[in-house]
Each structure stands twice: as structure tokens, then as C-alpha cells.
Image: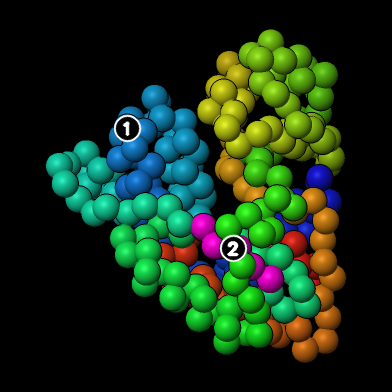
Amino acid sequence: MGRAFQNRKESMAKTADAKTKVYSKYGREIYVCAKTGGTDPTGNLTLRGLIDRAKKDQVPSHVIDKALDKAAGAGGEDFSPARYEGFGPGSCMVIVDCLTDNPNRTFGDVRGCFTKTKSKIGTPGSVSHLFDHCAIFVFAGSDEDATLEALMEADVDVTDIENEDGKLTVFAPHTEYAKTKQALIDAFGEIDFDTDEIQFVPQTVTPIEGDDVAMFEKLLDMLNDLDDVQNVYHNAEV
């Protein structure tokens, strides 16, 4: 699992750097998370992790505060999650997670990205069954046994723990994100997580080469330029 996770991190690095609308993406996600789970980060661990990630990505405090203020108020925008799956250049698999206030518009925009890059959008579930939907936590440490014991005592269904270069990586089912994070904090105190998020991790990778590389990068850039797109996951190995 770790190799696939690392491959995704490396291959998505360029995309992350290219996100010109990162503030609005974080603002929208924080708004929806706070609206559904509460605006207090101490009681909403998903929101807390999201705010921590936003700060690490240098999102200004006023963007975060504005999203929280909107979530605390009455009314507001009605965003809903939407997920699209398909096959990119070189037959790699792609998952696109969105937050949208107009599903018809978003589907048309995402489908256009696939069509213009010789890719094919699929039906729900067409590729996601070949990914693991994981909560992933990476932090400084080396004691796998103590970490596993703490998680088992908290009745967390741990998928995997890896120890490499002074860092521990904990994988757990996405449904146990909050429980896993709370168990780690209870056991080790406040932790400065390098990674603290839910991701789709591919079970296998698909090498792409030649002309497919440029077309694949174009697909990623086009998708990430869409306001409604929050995250893009794939199994491509360039």
C-alpha cells in the first residue's frame, strides 16, 4: 500500500503546485465540513484536520474564517458532493471528487475534460473498487508496536502501519478517520501530522509513457482548473 501511496504523492506534486484556485477549493470544503459537522474544530476532527492542511498549504486565515462564518450563519450555499470515475490516457484509472451547487454543470465540465484528452468517463463504481478508501496519518515516530497497541485499545480497525525514515504511516478505513485520529492524539498528545486526510489509494499502478504522459498531465490540469473539483486521484505512474 505504501508504494502506491507514495507514487500518488509524487505524481500529484505537479498538480498541487499548479492549483491556482487552492484558496477557493479549501474555502468550499471547510464550509461544507463545518456546515455538516459543526464549526468547532475541537468537536469536529475532520474540520480540524482540514484547517491544519489549509494552513500548511498557506491558505490565509481570513479565507478559513470566512468559510467558518458562512457555515455558522443561516442559509448559505447548498453544495453537495459528486464523484466521477473513468479511464485516462494509457488506460490509467481516475477518480474525481467534487463539491457542486449544480450537478448537471459539473458533470458536463468533468466529462469535457475527459473527452478533450482522449479519456473516457465511466459509471459510478467502474474504477473505485480498485482503490482503497483510506484515512492516512503520517507523523514522526518509530514505535510501531506502541502505535498499534494504542489503536487496538481504541478499537480501530487498522489496515496497515509502515515505519520508514523516522516516520510512521497509519492506514485505516475512511469511516474510522475521527476515531483513529483521536486514538493517536490520546496516546501521544498533540501530533504535528505530515499527512492527515482521507484518500483513494490505488491497489495497483498503471505505467504511462510516450504521448500519453502529456495528455495525462493535460487531463489533470484541466480537472484541477475546474472550481467544483476538490481532489483528483489516479493510479498512473509516469
> Magenta residues, as a range?
83-87
Mark 2: amino acid: Thr
Q: Main secondary structure of the magenta part?
A: strand
Against 101, residue 106 (above or below) is below
> Viewed as shown, does residue 112 lie left or right of 90?
left
> Viewed as shown, does residue 165 lie left or right of 223?
right
The label nearer to you, 1 versus 2, is: 2
Q: What SS does tag 2 mark?
A: loop
Residue 157 percent coordinates (x, y):
70, 23
Question: In the rendered image, is residue 13 in sight?
Answer: no
Against 132, residue 181 (above or below) is above
Quadrant of residue 151 in the image?
Answer: top right
- Compare residues 227 and 109 and report the one nearer the observer: 109
> Viewed as shown, does residue 137 lie left or right of 36?
right
Q: What number is the disc on residue 38?
A: 1
In primary-sequence order, the first of circles 1 and 2 is: 1
Give the residue displayed 81% in from the left and 24% down from the top.
Answer: 144
> Viewed as shown, does residue 178 lie left or right of 63?
right
Quadrant of residue 155 in the image?
Answer: top right
Magenta stretch contains residue 84: yes
Question: In the rendered image, is residue 203 in sight?
Answer: yes
Give the residue displayed 22% in from the left and 39% down from the top.
Answer: 72
Task: From the image, tell me which residue sits under label 2.
Answer: 123
Give the residue displayed 45% in from the left and 70% down from the top.
Answer: 107
Q: Do the residues labelled 1 and 2 touch (CB within 8 Å)?
A: no
Magenta stretch contains residue 214: no
Query: In the rendered image, which quarter contains the C terminus?
Result: bottom right
Give the residue displayed 25% in from the left and 43% down from the top.
Answer: 71
Which residue is at the far front?
A: 123
Query: In the rendered image, which quarter contains the N terminus?
Result: top right
Residue 116 percent coordinates (x, y):
57, 87
